[in-house]
Each structure stands twice: as C-alpha cells, then as structure tokens.
Amino acid sequence: MTGYTSASTGRQVRAVLFDTFGTVVDWRSGVAAAVRTFAARHELSLDPEGFADAWRGQYGPSMQRVSSGQRPFVNLDTLHRENLDAVLAEHGLDPARFAPGELDSLNLAWHHLPPWPDSAPGLAQLKRAFIVGPLSNGNTALLVDMAKAGGLPWDVILGSDVSRAYKPTPHAYTAPAALLGLDPGEMMLAAAHNGDLAAARGAGLATGFIARPAEYGPGGPAGAAPADTWDVAAESITDLARQLTAEP
C-alpha cells in the first residue's frame, strides 16, 4: 500500500482528523432521544426533533461570541448548558423549574451520540494507515465519552479546550497539526460540512468531504453534496478509507 498525497497541499497525508457532530455521529437523533425521555418524565409537550434542532441552532452563535472576543473561552459543555436554558425559555419553560442536576444530565446527551453505522469500521480501516482523531469543537471530556459510548477507535483525542479555539478560526485547525508534529498539509480534515472544509483548506489542510444526507432529518436543509473540489469526496467513512488506502 502506498501513501496518499493531497493534490491541494502536495504533501503526503499522515493524519485524517474528523469533524464529529453530523460527520461521525448522528447528533439529531441522539439529542432528540434524550429530549423525548426528559419530556416524558416531566409530562412536557415537546417536539423532540424540533427541540434538538433549536438547541443545535444555538451552537454556532454561541461559539462565535467566543471567537469574536465578546467573551472569554469556555468549553462546549458550558455553551451547550447555557444554550439549553435559552431553548427551554424559547419553549415557554422556566429552567428554574427543573433541578439543575436534571438539566446537567440532559446536557450529557451530547456526550453519548450514536455513531453512523459506517463510522467505527471506517475509522478502524483508516487507522491502519493514518493517525485518526477528532478535529471537533467538542471539549476533550465530551469527545472521550463519545468515543467510549460509540466504540470510536481514535488514536488521539484533542478537544477544542486544548487549542482554546473554535472552528472556523485558523488556530483550531493548525493547533492539532502542531501538537502531532505535522505540517498542516500533512493532515486532512474529513467533514460533512462545506464551510468547515473551506476553512480547513484556508488553514493549509487537505480536505475530504463525507456525505451525510440524513444529518438534519427528513425535509432538513440540503448540504449533502460537495460544494467545491475537495481532495476527496466520499459517500461514507468506509468509502473515504477505501479511496485513501486504495483497498477494495
């Protein structure tokens, strides 16, 4: 087996790091399942999928307030917990009516999201030839729990609390490469999101697109097709592994 050389960076790729939420794990169904259980326990009339979408909708704006300097860095667990209070209020529910521990437990739904069926086998295949790990806005504790719960065979886990930067800021992409002793061009970001890949390419990384048409559920926004000429476009992580390793 020969190595894979990125056409965009001209470097041999030594590490393939992954966006996690939506690319490796199914955040929508996992969060909705936890919300459904929470709503039943408290006899609440909630649309679990709609609540999950609203909670996820707070994700980007909350990180942007950190990246823009409006507030100091806090980890994603903290942002998710704050966002939970905001979404409860949007649904006419006072967070104070619930015991803090119950909301903290619901917040842990993000730690235990189910992987897509191809994720673990695809990662296992890739790690025979590359360093594999997450390149995620998740913090290290969240990503470790996610790996344990989902059987994700990472070689290394470097959360955003290590770089203290959220994507799409350049440092979020270059810091993991530096910690692994790699040039950015020797690392590939694999993601289902074109904006993430564009930022990674701008930071000097190779790029691999993975289609996840079911990320937002039936009738969700489009985004399953590559919007640019990335180094690789794959239908799954197993397909990405096949293309990068030239295995059948």
Image (spheres, helix red, strand yellow):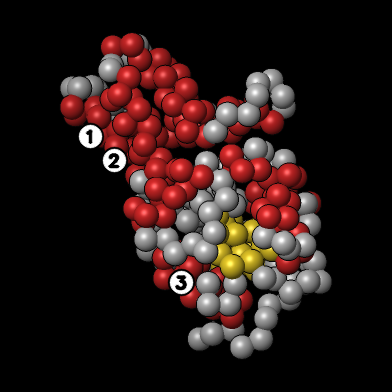
Q: Amino acid at mark 2?
A: Ala
- SS under mark 3: helix
Coordinates of residue 167 in the picture (x, y in percent): 65, 42
Disc nearer the start of the sequence (3/1):
1
Coordinates of residue 79 in the picture (x, y in percent): 51, 28
The image quadrant of residue 228 is: bottom right
Return the residue at label 1.
37
Q: Please say if the residues under marks 2 and 1 sit with CB atoms less than 8 Å apart.
A: yes
Nearer the viewer's eye, disc 2 or disc 3?
Answer: 3
Query: Disc 2 versus disc 3: distance between alpha carbons?
Result: 27 Å
- Asked if residue 239 shows in the view, the reply is no
Coordinates of residue 92 in the picture (x, y in percent): 35, 13
Vertically, is 94 above or below 76?
above
- SS under mark 2: helix
Q: Is residue 125 left or right of residue 180?
A: left
- SS under mark 1: helix
User: The N terminus is located in which quarter?
Assistant: bottom right
Q: Nearer the viewer, residue 55 or 81?
A: 81
Q: Is residue 56 left or right of residue 42?
A: right
Query: Disc 3 versus disc 1: distance between alpha carbons?
Result: 32 Å
Vertically, is 56 above or below 176?
above
Name the residue at the right extreme.
10
Q: Amino acid at mark 1?
A: Thr
Coordinates of residue 232 in the picture (x, y in percent): 65, 68
Query: Disc 2 versus disc 1: distance between alpha carbons?
Result: 6 Å
Return the residue at label 2.
33
Point out which mark residue 124 bears. Answer: 3
Q: Amino acid at mark 3?
A: Ala
Residue in the picture at 48% in, 68% down: 123
Q: Nearer the viewer, residue 195 or 178?
A: 178
Residue in the picture at 35% in, 27% down: 104
Q: Is residue 93 left or right of residue 132?
A: left
